[in-house]
């Protein structure tokens, strides 16, 4: 709500500013709360908006309708996709740790997550990698724009490729 209020105020004051919003404030609720002020805003998200044509989105929609038939898909948000992506990543780590025979907390971390290298999760995520020294799952995020009543991908930004020295030394990875 704070993002929507800021957008409405900036719009009312005719500031003409560009707004780039991180994923928690840039979702399907934003245009509903901000109205016309949401037009042209940009935001980043490492996963796809619900319903976009990406790998496994059909499963997300199928299960959403199956287990919560009272909530129409158009009332759901990108955070549904976010939750599925998180669970799919955890499931992959659990499978790996189980195969290694170590489903302890440390085993899931070291023999699960930290063995993941360029794993395709789906749902619009860039390949996921973890290591013993870097727990950032990916370096890429999609930049979306809200325009004409829909969220569309403008570009993909790869922080590691674009700023390798900062990625390595300045930005937290543990």
Image (cartoon, rainbow, N blue to C red):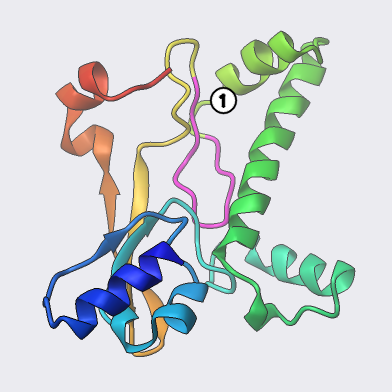
Whether residue 153 is visible, yes or no, is: no
Q: Position of residue 137 (x, y in %)?
A: 48, 32
Please determine whether, in this image, residue 43 is positioned above or below residue 105: below
Q: Residue at x 48, y 83 (%)?
A: 32
Residue of label 1: 116
- The residue under the point 65% across, 51% down is 83
123 and 37: which is toward the camera: 37
Q: Secondary structure at mark 1?
A: loop
Q: Quadrant of the C terminus?
A: top left
In screen coordinates, is 91 left or right of 32?
A: right
Quarter location, residue 58: bottom right
Question: Magenta region's main secondary structure?
Answer: loop
Q: Is residue 24 left or right of residue 86?
A: left
- Residue 42 visible: yes
**Where's residue 143, x and y in %?**
31, 60
Q: Residue at x 55, y 64 (%)?
A: 78
In the rendered view, tell whether residue 27 sits above or below residue 129.
below
User: Measured along the vertical axis of the image, is residue 60 above or below residue 88?
Assistant: below
121 sits left or right of 155 in the view: right
**Dividing the picture into quarters, in which one does residue 154 lie?**
bottom left
Mark 1 neighbour density, 10 Å: few (under 14) some (14–19) many (20 or more): many
Describe residue 39's horizontal placement relative to residue 79 as left or right.
Answer: left
Q: Is residue 122 magenta?
A: yes
User: Which region of the structure is painted magenta?
Assistant: 119-130
**Is 4 or 110 nearer to us in this picture?**
4
Task: Please check the rendered image and state whether residue 29 is part of the magenta-colored stretch, yes or no.
Answer: no
Q: Position of residue 112 (x, y in %)?
A: 67, 20
Of 103 and 38, the residue lying toward us:
38
| Mark count | 1
């Amino acid at each position: 709500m704070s993002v929507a209020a800021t957008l409405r105020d900036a719009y009312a004051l005719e500031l003409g500013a560009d707004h780039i919003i991180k994923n928690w404030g840039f979702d399907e609720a934003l245009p509903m709360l901000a109205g016309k002020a949401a037009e042209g805003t940009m935001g980043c998200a490492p996963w796809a908006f619900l319903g976009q044509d990406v790998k496994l989105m059909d499963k997300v929609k199928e299960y959403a309708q199956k287990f919560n038939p009272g909530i129409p898909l158009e009332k759901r948000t990108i955070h549904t996709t976010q939750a599925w992506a998180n669970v799919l990543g955890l499931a992959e780590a659990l499978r790996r740790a189980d195969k290694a025979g170590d489903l302890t907390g440390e085993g899931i971390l070291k023999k699960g997550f930290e063995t993941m290298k360029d794993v395709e999760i789906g749902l619009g995520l860039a390949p996921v990698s973890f290591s013993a020294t870097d727990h950032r799952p990916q370096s890429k995020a999609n930049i979306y724009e809200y325009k004409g009543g829909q969220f569309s991908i403008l570009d993909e930004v790869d922080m590691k490729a674009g700023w390798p020295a900062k990625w390595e030394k300045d930005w937290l990875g543990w």
